[in-house]
Image (cartoon, rainbow, N blue to C red):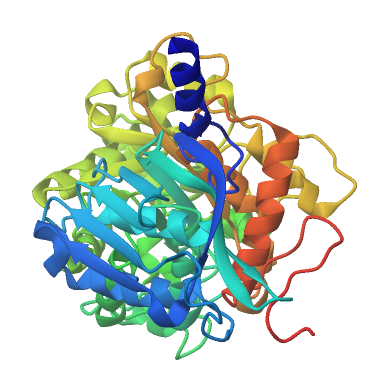
Amino acid sequence: MNKKIFFLFVTILPILCSCVSIWPQPKTVFSGDEQIVIDPSNFEILAEGAGAVSQILQDRINEYKKLMFPFPTESMKKQDQDSINQLKIIVQSDNEQLVLGVDESYTLSITFSPLAVGEIDSQTIWGAIRGLETFTQLIAYNYSTEDYSISELPITIHDEPRFPWRGILLDTARHFYPIPIIKDFIRSMSFSKFNTFHWHIVDAQSFPLQVNNYPLLSEKGAFCPWCTYSFDQIKDLISFAKGYGIRVVPEIDGPGHDGSFGKGYKDLISNCPIWGEINQNFVTINPTKQLTYDVMTDIWTEFSSVMEDNYLHFGGDEVYTLCWLEDSEIRQWMEDHDMSTKQLEEYYFEKMSHIATSLGKKFVVWNEVFALQNSSLLQNAIIQVWNNGEVLKDIVEAKIQALASFGWYLDQQHPNDKEYYEWMDTWKGMYYNEPTNGIESGEEYILGGEACMWSEQVFPSSLQTRVWPRACAVGERLWSQKDVLDEQDATNRLNKFSCILNQRKIPTSPLSPGFCYTGNNS
């Protein structure tokens, strides 16, 4: 008798598995082997709990209901057929603050008996939004029978991100990207559960940012009169991104890559025509002028007035100090103050650090700043590493917070020095690029990472296909557990997810030959 009872028990209990095709892979999945249909005309999503009043959540519910059922279908012909007609979302908190480390966890369950009911439980609306994405990916459309269904029921998913900082950098200085293009890109990021948009706004090639007290910066520095961003537009973009659970971290690079500053105000940059002629990226800002810090204070004060996030990005990569040495006035200033070029760079970042502190912000810099070995400067900084894992190892062993970007440069075909015959196969190198490899101590100082889309050779029209689906690999590496490494399983899931992105009107490249039904290719 006991054996029979035990046998019955184990046959109805869902099992822990990775058989459900979700991108990125959830933390744990318990699933069964039943299937149920969904009638879009008889399906509703209800929000409960303190967070139910959130307009952000309601907006995403309305959007996801459309994404769940992208193709027309007839109402169920068999009204007695079992179906799921409700998804309940229970959000405990009404706090809509979106900052680094916010709770994005959720539990998703779909029961099968006695009634088919879906439920998402989360502490915050951000977890609920991540859960909505997962639920939507569970729904399959059969274009032959024209109906929707969910398989592997009953199912319970417990999910949360591995890292709190999961971002993509977009460079809008090498090519100008209109605000609608950036919004579409931010929206597409949310589907892979990214949560940080790193906006590299200004570089040597152009200065598209409108600064109210220094109008010549954009009037002379932008590619064209309309190739600019006002702070009203930036405020609107930040609000839009928040609606998808994505923070916006702006970057004004310095003291290198700053030639565009000088197009409007020549005193802001170093006088180094020899090095500037060789490469415009070599032109540095002039850190000896008070005007430099007046302008930077103005820029970051305006940013702080429109942003909720706590972090500003001050750049710091590839500072060609020979440009300073070519400038006779800077050389004289260094001599008068008994400074080397290294000390002058420290001087610049100490000034920038004071600006951040005065605004109640923290800051991010590229890994070259770590080489300055200024402990007082670095103690409140996050170092973004683009060089290699050894640099990341040194930083976290020094107990400094860091982000990984090495191996995740989307402008490069072979960011990991491993060659692939097919362009899109480079996602595999990004997928296996584990930030913690080789790190024996200090792993807790790795906050996450970012893929980087430098735009020297990317038009707005080709942005999405250059990024997706390769960046999806980075999204899973930063969201999913460290041991999620099965290449064949990942390939199958990513192929399906690439098709889902296409169905959502996001131009995405395929991984391999096949067919993706989009409703207009029959």
Residue 468 in view (yes/no)? no
Location of residue 390 (image quadrant): top right
**Residue at 38% of width from left, 74% of height from top?**
43
**Residue at 34% of width from left, 39% of height from top?**
164
Can you say which quadrant of the picture contains the N terminus? Answer: top left
Q: Residue furthest bottom?
A: 225
Where residue 517 appears, x then y in whole percent? 72, 74
Q: Is residue 175 above or below residue 278?
A: below
Residue 296 in view (yes/no)? yes
Where residue 504 appears, x then y in whole percent? 56, 74
**Residue at 12% of width from left, 52% of height from top?**
93
Q: Is residue 14 above or below residue 519?
A: above
Location of residue 218 (image quadrant): bottom left
Would residue 430 be found to the left or right of residue 5 on screen? right
Would residue 70 be found to the left or right of residue 111 on screen? right
Q: Nearer the viewer, residue 195 or 114?
A: 114
